[in-house]
Image: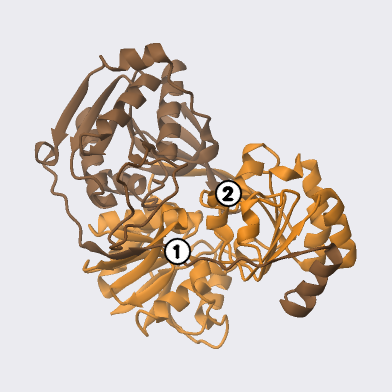
Chain colours: A orange, B brown
Amino acid sequence: MSVLIIAEHDNKSLKPATLNTVTAATQIDADVHVLVVGFECQTVVEQASQVAGVSKVLVADNAAYEHQLAENVSKLVVEIAGDYGHILAPATTTGKNTLPRVAALLNVAQLSDVIKVESADTFVRPIYAGNAIATVKTTDPVKVLTVRATGFDAAASTGGSAERQVLSQVIASDRSRFVKEQLAESDRPELTAANVIISGGRGMGNGDNFKLLEGIADKLGAAIGASRAAVDAGFVPNDLQVGQTGKTVAPDLYIAVGISGAIQHLAGMKDSKVIVAINKDEDAPIFQVADYGLVADLFDAVPELEKSL
Amino acid sequence: MKILVSVKRVIDYNVKVRVKSDQSAVDLTNVKMSMNPFCEIAVEEAIRLKEKGVASEVVVVSVGSKSCQETLRTAMALGADRAIQVEAEDGLDSLSVAKLIAKVAQEEAADLVIMGKQAIDSDNNQTGQMVAALLDYPQATFASEIVIENGEAQVTREIDGGLQTLAITLPAVVTTDLRLNEPRFASLPNIMKAKKKPLDVKTSADLGVEVGSNVSIVSVTPPPQRAGGIKVGSVAELVDKLKNEAKVVS
């Protein structure tokens, strides 16, 4: 049976995590459909139809879906669920918000944060903040999964030519209302999509010192992240947090500055291709996972690194 | 207004997790257990709402074996008024737990259900959303601020890239994120008082809920270890390695 993916988007563009989810879906079944639920989201539909491996794009375009409220989207998905053996969404805050609702309405389990597809009914997912890896098998008639983007390569964003189908159902809850959104505005790439990330920890000392990382981030086209310790200390907002309780990332290059390497942080970045650690404590656990460790005072090393790049 | 808070007993977040040698599960024998950190935040928020006079009663519920009564007592020491243990095997799947909590929420006629966004053992991040779906309640997940006004909860949510505020009509389900509050510690007098607070035990049969799951564990293994790398002596050497050895910087 076909696989349905709920697209991650902001009504303007398809988010990269969707492409990784498409790759996971193609490992389950060759017939992959993408559902775009939104409002005035035509460009997203265009982009989704061009993704390699997608055979059909379903579109529900209505003001009721502008903010993709879980109450509405879940009921819409349930209405079309009968055609599918699997329903997938990226394990983003949107996917995690909506998909368990879908599973409960279908009276089936949901598997969260899948990092590997063993077969159409057996999947691998981290538990205990990545300190254990569980392989689980499900015999549910519809298998509902969120997919961790870092576990799968991105599908090619071009080369496909999916057919389109318009869904006319409008489901609008009167008990949930969007009030406002404050999104961090930045020219830098999003953390979960960046090829290079430079993160600061408690060693940064204060929020102002995070500016030290900006020069390197600009030179490398990097996103800026932080450890939970830096967030808890109030240096930077929580959406920069990399770790078990924040974002899971796997860039080509991860530079950890003044981060000791608590388990909770490692859980969020240990799948990075190359890890660099700069810390003045030579016994910091971060050095156990770093490919290149530099024992140095970050306030000397970071400006020097910026100059030499 | 009555608030129902769910709490889960999990391996303490400071404990190093070890996998059993037969790869069936994580080893929980003789391991320190505590209240799931996100559930602590949920309890704290409910108590604060009561202290502000917004809530009149805080009921705390946990699904599990007898040992979860300890977690319920902790919640009552923090300020919850009474507790319900739903007797069940430990490690029930999220949907079963959601069905049980949904039933309790209905029986209690709770106006607001506050739950942790995820448990740090199974890392599912599902149960709150499922409770909301089963009851056809609106939901606000990953909350960093809750304001109750005119039968509505205005909830600020931590989403990828920033914050979103939703207004949901009560009854509703809210799940907590880290920055919602900083939980208090229980004082000794309150720990003593909590021993006298009422704790009811119910079974899934009492609640008329059938539990079970079609998901089975094939194996649980330790994660692949990352091989440690090398220490470099200077920034110049680091840049050289990144350019010429790892080739991640041009």
Q: Chain of mark 2?
A: A
**Image quarter of the C terminus of chain A:** bottom right
Residue A26 shows which numbered tag?
Answer: none
Residue B24, given in percent of the width and then of the height, sits at 27, 60
Q: Say if B65 sits above or below A95 in the image.
A: above
The answer to whether marks 2 and 1 sit on the same chain is no
Q: Chain of mark 1?
A: B
Quickly name the residue at label 2: A262
Quickly name the residue at label 1: B223
Residue A168 in view, yes or no: no
Residue occupying image coordinates x 41% and y 62%: B222
Query: Mark 2 and mark 1: span between their CA atoms?
Result: 16 Å
Residue occupying image coordinates x 86% and y 52%: A300
| SS for dot 2 | loop
Q: Which amino acid type is marked by label 2?
A: Ala
Q: Nearer the viewer, residue B146 or A136?
A: A136
Q: Nearer the viewer, residue A248 or B18?
A: B18
